[in-house]
Amino acid sequence: MGQAGEPIIVVENLTARFGPNVVFEKVSFEVYRGEVLVVLGGSGCGKSTLLKHMIGLYRPAAGRVLIDGIDVNTRNRRKLEELRRKIGVAFQSGALFGSMTLGENVALPLEGHTRLSASDIQRVVKMKLAMVELAGYENHLPSELSGGMQKRAGVARAMALDPEVLFFDEPSAGLDPVTGAGLDNLIQNLNAGMGTTMVVVTHELASIFAIAHRAVMLDKSARGIIAVGSPRDLQGRRDDPRVFNFFNRQWARPGAGGS
């Protein structure tokens, strides 16, 4: 895992606002090179909104996000192209094109952002699918696969350009516990084997303890971050009932400090 002092992502005073609704404000943290950072919190706290700001899908009301020194909202086309090669995103649904085979889905980033020959692209596609345990499925359509296999195919496509950072939005959502654990194992293996930095949005406790080096906890009522640390450290924190209750599966009475 990357050491403190080697941030690849810097989030500075980030504020998300939609009309009069402020989702979170003045959020700041760093993601270290090579680590798995989990963004967590209760429903409606802004986890997925934060991820979409971090990959440049949303423009912030204030603040900025830098990935390897590049502002994700840069208007410089050369810098934007450089940034797109540095990151991969595995969306909650898998976000595969249903009319295209798995091989064609994984090939899309390679066709759009490289000058590889068709034969080289096919070699990379086969390698990426093999890495997510989908070797031999190049010619299958997404509809022919289980939900877990579709998610793994989405990871293969996100990895197509060998990104420095992989983002995952609720990777275990909609999966049974065994399939979800398999996806957690895949994330661990990719991080350990390739050293890829990962930012994972989830509220699944089992996943958090399995994959996270550190966690950033958002809270709806606080409109921002209430805790940062390793899952084990946060589990033992008794100074904030919201943090303790989340990590120990305890329900908080309304008005008792819960989110």
Image (cartoon, grey):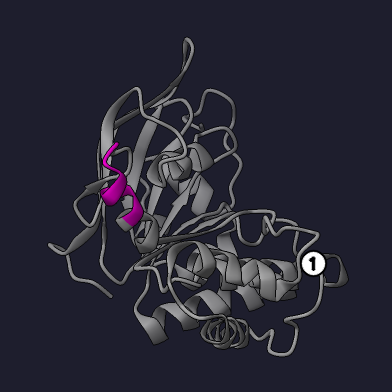
What residue sits 79% from the left and 67% below the top?
142
What residue sits 12% from the left and 62% below the top?
5
Nearest to the observer: residue 175 or residue 65 = 65
- Which residues make up the magenta segment? 75-81
**Location of residue 236 (image quadrant):** bottom left
Report crowding for label 1: few under 14, some 14 to 19, many 20 or more residues within 10 A (C-alpha).
many
Q: Is residue 32 above or below residue 217?
A: below
What residue sits 67% from the left and 55% below the top?
95
Give the x, y percent position of residue 87: 40, 60
Nearest to the observer: residue 160 or residue 114 = 114
Give the x, y percent position of residue 140: 81, 76
Residue 79, magenta (yes or no): yes
**From where the camera sits, is residue 239 visible?**
no
SS type, badge 1: helix
* Amino acid, disc 1: Pro
On the rendered structure, is 125 left or right of 230?
right
Nearest to the observer: residue 220 or residue 257 = 220
